[in-house]
Amino acid sequence: QPLFIKRSLSWRVPLDCDKQRSSKSTMGSPTEKRSMEGEICKAAKAARCGGVNSCNFVSDRHWDEFRERGYVNLGKVIPAELLERMDRRVNDIMDGTVNYGDKLMMQLDPGGAYGDAVQSEQTAGHKGATRAYRKIGEAGFGLECDDVFREAMTLPVFREACAEVYGPHADIAVYRAMLFNKPAEAGTDLPWHQDGGDWWGLDRDPLIFVWTALDDATSKNGCVQVVPGSHKLGLLSRRGHTLSAETMAKVGVTGNAVNVEVAKGESVLMHNFLIHRSGINLTPAPRRAFSVNYADGRTRLQHPKPVVQPEGKPGPDLGFKEPGQALPIVFAQDLPPF
């Protein structure tokens, strides 16, 4: 059995305006107390949602499931019309009719096992008109450059989720926004890993990402697999990223993994520390997904970047080139200076 650490995640303070009624207060009449409590709750909700009072996109049930399992399906929270535009834009980018040059990383699918080629061939620029791309976008040269995908990643539902995790005061940045593609009857076998640690070279670890299916994701076409609850362990190595065989055995990955099958258009909120992987696509149609990793807006690249093991060198720079570089802000809070 996995040795999960039973501890609560301190970032979330439940906000239930109907239950937060103090029976001990003696100040003012019941009507005055209810009015004051209502105003406090309204202000708190507005802060969480960037000024939108009616932000109940993510329910308490969703958050309970997320805290327990490390992931939760939010449903079809991206409008259908926008999803259609995202679908068309993916094809346009792959075909080269929309071309962002050195602003966007584009990697062809090497297929098969996850090896050195997957890490070394992540370079900017269009690689030819083909649907055989593995990944479009990465840290520092991601899909935040595209207006359609930027519209999707800045929807109020995702602002609300970020405010719950990072606090309503925090500006929110995007570390990486990218398309994962497993071409028909192909794809790369992505090993068990966590998203974070010294491999990423950031001064603090991002905590959440949103994975939106642009096609049905099933066990046959390489859906994400996870170890539910494994996020409670925190990062399992200073390096982060892929797991050693010893760590996998200790956690009990093989016997506790489940498939996360997702219908086209559904978005899944996941914790970065959740242990996850995905296999190859055995079907005659592609399996595409849009993934956005949200971070605290104060996040910076470490300088110098830490050396990671067993490589004996820092993780890849990818699109970020400047020492101490900030991440692009997607949600900014309008707070007074004091």
Image: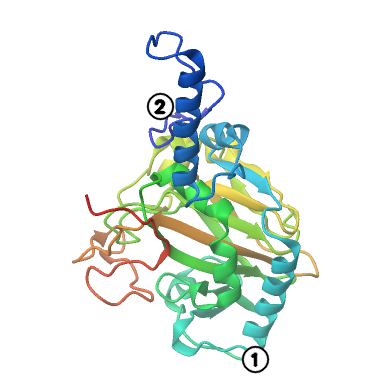
Callouts 1 and 2 close, C-beta under 8 Å: no
Q: Say which element carries label 1.
A: loop
Residue name at image x 47 percent, y 49 percent? 162
Residue in the foreground of this view, choosing between 105 and 224: 105
What residue is shown with label 2?
7
Q: Position of residue 37 (x, y in %)?
A: 46, 26
Tag shown at residue 111 = none
Q: Is residue 118 left or right of residue 79?
A: left
Q: Is residue 117 left or right of residue 217?
A: left
Q: Can you say whether 318 is above or below 255 in the image?
A: below
Between the residue at mark 1 and the residue at mark 2, the CA separation in whole angstroms equals 50 Å
Res. 179 visible in picture: no
Q: Position of residue 188 (x, y in %)?
A: 60, 67
Residue in the foreground of this view, choosing between 51 and 257: 51
Res. 264 visible in picture: yes
Residue name at image x 30 percent, y 49 percent? 238
Q: Amino acid at mark 2?
A: Arg
Upstream in the sequence, badge 1 or badge 2? 2
Q: Is residue 5 left or right of residue 286?
A: left
Q: Can you say whether 48 is above or below 283 in the image?
A: above
What residue is shown with label 1?
97
Q: Say which element carries label 2.
A: loop
| Residue extending farthest left | 304
Residue name at image x 44 percent, y 76 percent? 141
